[in-house]
Amino acid sequence: FCRGCFDCWGKTPGQCAIKDDMPELINTFLESDFIGMATPVYGMLMSALLKNFTDRLLPLATPHIHRNSDGSFYHEGRVKRFPQQFYLANSGFPGLHNFDLLKPFCGMQNMVLEVYRNCGEILQYPVNETPIGQKIKDFYEALELAGMEIASKGHVSEKIKTKLHGEIISDEEYMAGANDSWDQELAKQ
């Protein structure tokens, strides 16, 4: 975990005081054209592993503060170019409020694509000819097309974004299925 010692700003500018594989990960990050970050949603936030990674990018900033064009403030960047990023978040709960805390974080990162998939546990179901199976298949195909568009064009078309954010199952259907599964599991005990 980042210790908050700020050695990467003073004693060893641009270098973390923790001796591990993070310098190699930062080099890979900076050498990349695109970086994809994905996380399950736990308690409306990204996973601890992804949060730790983003915290450990602190050596890429300086201690000097500047005002952004939107009026917010942040540290000056130490590097000239950051990779473009895309973000995938998967919540096992229905509804879109599960992402209310993640969306502002992504909004500050200039993402090429943000995918917030609610009712995410449905994605583990088989891709088959059932209506839900077909919607899952369509989602995975749209995800693949989004990756191809990012790689070839540097952005994702609105048509593909619409497919990615389409409903796979209604919140009510999802809750009924999830609650029935838990009731069956508890009845076994």
Image (spheres, rainbow, N blue to C red):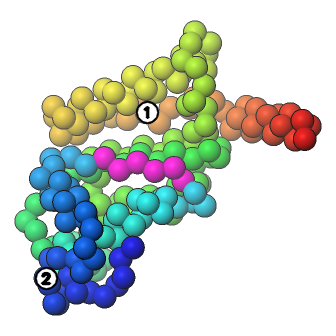
Q: Which mark is residue 164?
A: 1
Q: What stretch is highlighted in magenta?
A: 36-41
Whether residue 155 can be seen here:
yes
Give the number of the mark in front: 1 or 2: 2
What residue do we see at 31% from left, 70% from top?
56
**Quadrant assignment for the C terminus:** top right
**Is there CB contact under 8 Å for labels 1 and 2?**
no
Badge 2: few (under 14), some or many (20 or more) residues near its Cα, within 10 Å? some
Q: Where is residue 169 in the image (x, y as percent from the top left)?
A: 63, 30
Q: Where is residue 93 in the image (x, y as percent from the top left)?
A: 65, 46
What residue would you read off at disc 2? Answer: 13
Q: Is residue 51 above or below residue 179?
A: below
Which of these two is toward me, 93 or 51?
51
Q: Which mark is residue 180?
A: none
Ranked by sequence position, the earlier of labels 1 and 2 is: 2
What residue do we see at 31% from left, 47% from top?
36
What residue do we see at 26% from left, 87% from top?
6
Q: Which secondary structure, mark 1?
A: helix
Q: In this view, does 157 lie above or below 64?
A: above
- Residue 107 location, quadrant: bottom left
Amino acid type at mark 1:
Leu
Q: In this view, does 33 lie above or below 180?
A: below
